[in-house]
Amino acid sequence: MILKDIELLRELCLCFGPSGCEDRVRELIYEQIKDFCDDITIDRMGNLIAVVHSEKADAKKIMVSAHMDEVGFMICDIDSDGYLKFCTVGGIDPRVLSSRAVTVGDENRQTDGIIGSLAIHHQNAEDRKKITPIDKMYIDIGANSKEDAEKYVGIGDFGTFKTNFVLFGKDDKMMRAKAIDDRLGCTVMIEIIRYFAEHKDKKPDCNIAFSFSVREEVGLSGALTAADSIHPDFAIVLESTAIADIADVPENSRVAKVGDGGVISLLDRSTIYDAKFIEFALQTAKENNIAVQIKKYLSGGNDANHIHKSREGVRTLALSAPTRYLHSASCVAKTDDYFAIKELTLKMLENSKNLFERYIGVK
């Protein structure tokens, strides 16, 4: 069944897919695009790469990238009472973990559990002032012994938050879910692939390689091999970014705002983004009346880190969804921003000739 936009995003967010365990996400994406692209491959790392070819023989190549994986957990021990000890996969604040519902297992077998820790009634005054460290937490799957727990889960299995996808707020335009980072970017790419298949007269003057990458949350390794195999001239990285537009944060400390469109990065901890590409994105947004904003803080990093350094170098742009409570069980974003990112990415690809003309005479 072909799913569209927010319903598709819902299904992707609900998929079990921590770093290193992206199979279910990839299977869903494959089913959604297999009949709409000119070429589709899965490389040794697990990246899914779908290509839309230009009719020009000497066409330049644009890589559009989003990662399939999400933050999660790995089971590292099972104690005699059947409780699971775990470590985090990707950056998760321990303060958002206690009492969270989770799913643990692998692509083929999963069971539900709860992250537990010592209840406040059993903590002393000093303990109550501290953040409970992860090594003092455990996952309770209802087992009564190690042998019982091992019927459902093993050391080295993975886990994710168990969270429903909920629309809320005025006109149901706010979204709450796990894994919006970066299933939102994946959804944008799927919709654009299908758009070009359905509007063959709109095919741009470039080859487009859509890379659904693995393992972004634990070292960006999937994007490294994908970029080396695609060998693009340009890249658009679709992401989610933490924004701090919440209560008691002063205006000058807010990175971006939910509802103000996609977020364009100037630089982060690993990448300085191409100035002419940024200019092109802002001009395209203005000409098409698409909401867009500039990221007002230098932080983080994403798959652009490896992509822009691959081979001879790649001119790269990052366009992110402004997201509250990133890397938690309940990320919050807005449907308006999803549609703005989708429209801006599509218009940039359709008008790629104008992008390329900015580099005439530049190696």
Image: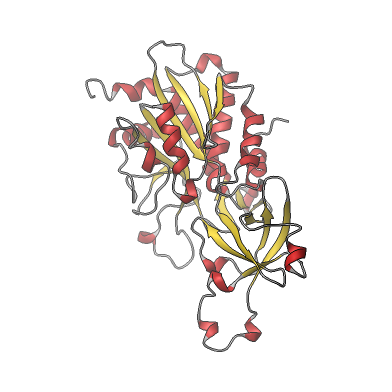
**Viewer-proximal residue among 303 and 321:** 303
| Callout count | 0
**Quadrant (top left/top right/bottom left/bottom right) for the C terminus:** top left
Image coordinates for residue 82, horizontal then vertical, percent: 72, 68
Q: Return the x and y of residue 243 as percentages of the image width and height.
A: 45, 55
Which of 288/165 is in front?
165
Of residues 88 and 340, which is closer to you in this image? 88
Q: Position of residue 123 (x, y in %)?
A: 60, 85
Residue at 73 percent across and 56 percent down: it is 111
Q: Would you say residue 289 is visible in this rendering? A: no
Residue drawn at 40 percent across, 45 percent down: 293
Residue 267 seen anywhere in this rendered image of the structure? yes
- In the current view of this chain or complex, which residue is farthest to the left? 361
Asked which quadrant contains residue 81, the reply is: bottom right
Q: Residue 311: which quarter of the image?
A: top left
Closer to the camera in the image, 243 or 273 = 273
Q: Which residue is pictured at 67% across the width and 42% down the height? A: 11
- Is residue 152 found left or right of 85 in the rendered image? right
Q: How is the image coloured?
A: secondary structure
Residue at (33%, 44%) from the top-left corner?
271
| 38 left or right of 164 in image | left
Q: Is residue 52 above or below residue 277?
A: above
- Residue 237: which quarter of the image? top left
Q: State whether residue 33 is above or below residue 161.
A: above
Percent x, y of residue 254: 40, 58
Quadrant position of the N terminus in the picture: top right
